[in-house]
Image (spheres, rainbow, N blue to C red):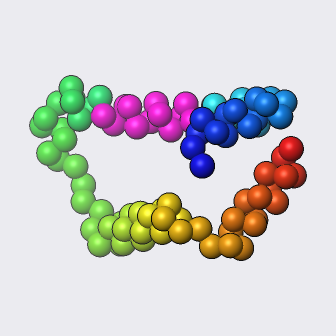
Amino acid sequence: MSEYQLLRAAAGGGAWLVLVLFLAASSVVFLSASRHLIDMAFGDPISAVQGARDGNPAALIVVSAMGLLLLLGLWMPLWFSGALGSAAAVLG
């Protein structure tokens, strides 16, 4: 499901609170990602080199989250799809 479809469904259904909350949350995510990208492009190279390393536990969390995201992007279990449909029906 794309963000555009979510916005159209919220606006079409008159769910203005959901629309505003979604836009606010998307803006926070976009600005947070942009801040890191700007730091990488225009930041001080000396401070970037001195960063701390998180190690294997952090890598395990990231790899497992990315794997789950990839799995749900390629195949969505029927029970999960039904739960999302029920939640969408409750919201309007």
User: How far from the left and from the top, in percent, is residue 41?
Assistant: 21, 30
The image quadrant of residue 8 is: top right
User: How far from the left and from the top, in percent, is residue 51?
Assistant: 22, 49
User: How far from the left and from the top, in percent, is residue 20?
Assistant: 72, 29
Q: Which residue is found at the position 77% from the left and 58% from the top?
A: 85
Nearer to the camera, 65 or 88: 88
**Residue 57 appears in the picture as rendered:** yes
Q: Which residue is found at the position 71% from the left and 73% from the top?
A: 79
**Residue 68 appears in the picture as rendered:** no
Q: How many marks?
A: 0
Residue at the far top in the pictured view:
42
Compared to residue 16, the image places residue 62 above or below, namely below
Nearer to the camera, 67 or 12: 12
Span of residues in magenta: 24-37
**Position of 90 compared to 64: left or right?**
right
Q: Is residue 17 magenta?
A: no
